[in-house]
Amino acid sequence: MTINIGEIGEELSTLELAETPEGGQVQGPRSGWRLALATFVGNKLAVVGAGIVIFFILFSFVGPHIYVTNQTYTNPIAAFQAPSAKHLLGTDPAGFDELGRIMKGGQAALEIGFLSALIATVIGTLVGSVAGLVGGVVDGLLMRLVDVMLSIPLLFVILIVSARFHGTSVVNLSLIIGVFSWLVSARLVRGEVLSLRERDFVFASQTMGATRRHLIFKHLIPNALGVVIVNITFQVADAINLLAILGFLGFGLQYPAVDWGDMLSQALTWLQDGYWWTVYPVGICLVLVVMAFNFIGDALRDTVDVRLRRR
């Protein structure tokens, strides 16, 4: 019996064509979280931003246990030493190791950034949810309060409150920044709630006797989490920027605590004398962290918006 290879190939090709649906291969729909993850991972800037944030978290909190330095007692004899094997980024005017100083400042920046963003998000989410659900006079009063507070320069208010209540600790500065940074969150959540409260599941829950508290915590806030999560990343970036500005103006953390803004404020005095290592490394760290959170926020905004997802 003679086997014709050409005939077998033609038969296999015919079978493959018969099994393949017209228009190409059909794939089942992917779940929402897989689409969201694919959209996020597909954004190269978001991946780079996430990598930078993870690096600085490890750098700031794990680094001091590996690269051990003295950040408590000054050593004027060791001031302004150039980068070397002993001090990888040199020393500052007080004799502190610059790399260890940047690690310690990074701890304060990330702690205040996340804590103040959490405080602002909680306040803004609650206020926005109540305003959007209740509506009427309550909505009008709350939104006029937001309008008035938005018309006042945020930095000006934080400077006054920080000077009055001596906001020199991580917790104090986080509270001050968080309490005056919830306005944008409130507006975003209110807009989302105004749309959600017209949905069928909200009407069904109201028909079954659900209270406003139940609607807010069980239906409205969970369904508005996409907007909330996106806003948190921008809140963290804004808080780190505000902390740097406060430190630069002399209203940030005080010795023995340190923040990047305070380091930059002191170092600029010595930049013209050639001590570049006291300015550029900490400045680059500040720019990278803020930029990374903005990259992540932009990607999350595209991820939670189903109209911008790749299908």
Image (tube, rainbow, N blue to C red):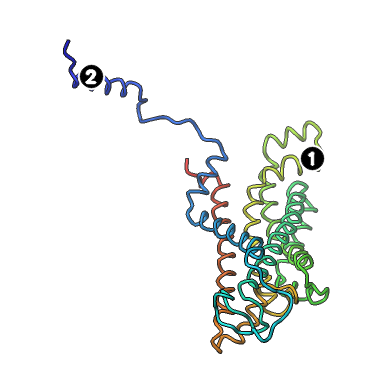
Q: Position of residue 166 (x, y in %)?
A: 81, 75
Q: Which residue is mark 2?
A: 8
N-term mark: 2 or 1: 2
Q: Residue at x 62, y 59 (%)?
A: 58
Q: Which residue is mark 1?
A: 214
Seen in the image, is 107 located left or right of residue 126?
A: left
Q: Position of residue 258 (x, y in %)?
A: 70, 73
Please rate how many residues cluster around mark 2, counting C-alpha atoms within 10 Å: few if below 14, some from 14 to 19, many from 20. few
Q: Position of residue 200 (x, y in %)?
A: 68, 34
In front of the other: 152 or 57: 57
Quadrant of the image containing the N terminus? top left
- Secondary structure beneath dot 2 equals helix
Seen in the image, is 212 located left or right of residue 308?
A: right
Q: Residue at x 68, y 86 (%)?
A: 76
Please rate how many residues cluster around mark 1, counting C-alpha atoms within 10 Å: few if below 14, some from 14 to 19, many from 20. few
- Secondary structure beneath dot 1 equals helix
> Does the residue at mark 2 contact the one at mark 1 (Cβ under 8 Å)?
no
The residue mark sitting in front, 2 or 1, is: 2
| Alpha carbon separation for disc pair 2 and 1 | 67 Å
Q: Amino acid at mark 1?
A: His
Please say if 270 is above or below 56. below
Q: Position of residue 235 (x, y in %)?
A: 66, 60
Quarter of the rendering containing residue 236: bottom right
Quarter of the rendering containing residue 52: bottom right
In front of the other: 71 or 214: 71
Q: Residue at x 66, y 78 (%)?
A: 96
Q: Residue most toward the bottom?
A: 273
Q: Residue most toward the front?
A: 86
Q: Amino acid at mark 2?
A: Ile
Seen in the image, is 262 located left or right of residue 162?
A: left
